[in-house]
Image: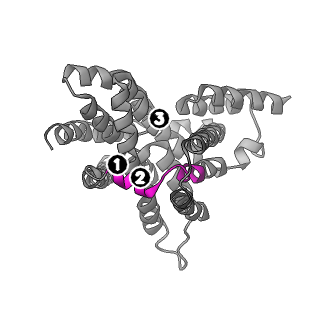
Amino acid sequence: MLNFIFTFFVLISLFVGNAALSIFLGIFFAYYFKISKIFFSRQVGTIPLQIGILILGATISVPYALDVSSEYLPWISLFVIVSFFAGLILGRILGVHHRVAFLISSGAAICGGTAMAAVAPIIKAKPQELLIAMTIVFLLNAVAIILFPIIGGYLEMSNFEFGAWSALVVHDTSSVIGSALIYSNESAQVAATLKLGRTIWLIPLIFIANLIFNRQTKVTRFPIFILFFIAAIFTNTILNLNDEIIYFLQMLSQAFLIFGLFCIGSQFDTNEIKSITSKPLIMAVSIWVLVIPSAYILVKYF
């Protein structure tokens, strides 16, 4: 019976396709039905997320990404680096746990839940730490989808400017597209293209995470799934996959990521909810306070 209920909840998550809702459904499932620690969703860890990231790599073509974002790529790279390290500094100042600060900084600088899911196994983040970071980032994404098109209209941003602004400021890829699509179809195309410039930074992020958190080990542990992620990018580039296959892979990747987030939610220990403080939220909002006007100045005047 429990397996049937589990399947039902997973299907709801996949049908809706909302990352934050998937997390909360996982929490509700675990809490209401009091699942054991050996239940499937608690045993798989981050494997579904890793599979989703691997498939995501197969949707990225290196020449395409470099070609369409060549003008903005240096600015995007600078923006990612500054945002990431500014987040780490803010986390230290505010006294946020170093793993949570690293997760939030990764998500805010690069691509939301995907970046956090990628580094979580490397930094040995606990399920509740990943949940805290993802919940905060996705909450801000929800705010962005609602408010950013209104702000863009008030500031009289062009379609291209708003698309570029969304690509730089909004964390999660789906939320970037969602926010830009509300503004215009052209903005959505610009946002989707430039967001690839941030997504590519997943690769150096993995190296940074491995260097910082595993530097005391004699053998540097590099996650195998990231090697496959890199291989998937080059596979796409070599085979020049058509649009139909890319679309299928995007849907498949999203399905695994959504399922993985549901499993992460089910791994959350409600007994440790008391450990959640306002500091991680203040940290994430502070990054936004720095990033939003900076990105606006960049796309408006440079």
Residue 179 on image: x %, y %:
38, 28
- The residue shown at (15%, 44%) is 302
For the residue labelled by badge 3, is the local secondary structure a helix, a strand or a loop? helix
Of residue 160 and residue 171, the one placed in the foreground of this image is 160
Q: Which residue is mark 3?
A: 174
Residue 274 on image: x %, y %:
52, 36
* Residue type indicated by callout 3: Ser
Quarter occupied by residue 281: top left
Query: What distance separates the C-alpha of mark 3 from that of mark 1?
Result: 19 Å
Count neighbours of disc 2 (C-alpha within 10 A) and say few if under 14, some if 14 to 19, many if 20 or more.
Answer: few
Do residues under tags 1 and 2 come within 8 Å of each other at their CB atoms?
yes
Quarter occupied by residue 260: top right
- The residue shown at (57%, 58%) is 239
Residue 223 on image: x %, y %:
57, 64
For the residue labelled by badge 1, is the local secondary structure a helix, a strand or a loop? helix
- The residue shown at (43%, 27%) is 142
In the picture as drawn, the residue positioned furthest to the bottom comes out as 218
Q: Which residue is mark 2?
A: 64
Compared with residue 269, is residue 235 higher up or lower down, i.e. above or below? Answer: below
- The residue shown at (31%, 41%) is 168
* Residue type indicated by callout 2: Tyr
Q: Which residue is mark 1?
A: 68
Residue 191 visible? The answer is yes
Queried whether the magenta region covers residue 65, the answer comes back as: yes
Which of the numbered marks, if any, corresponds to residue 291?
A: none
Q: Nearer the viewer, mark 3 or mark 1?
A: 1
Q: Which residues are magenta?
A: 53-69
Query: What distance separates the C-alpha of mark 3 from that of mark 2?
Result: 20 Å
Residue 251 on image: x %, y %:
60, 38
Mark 3 or mark 2, earlier in chain: 2
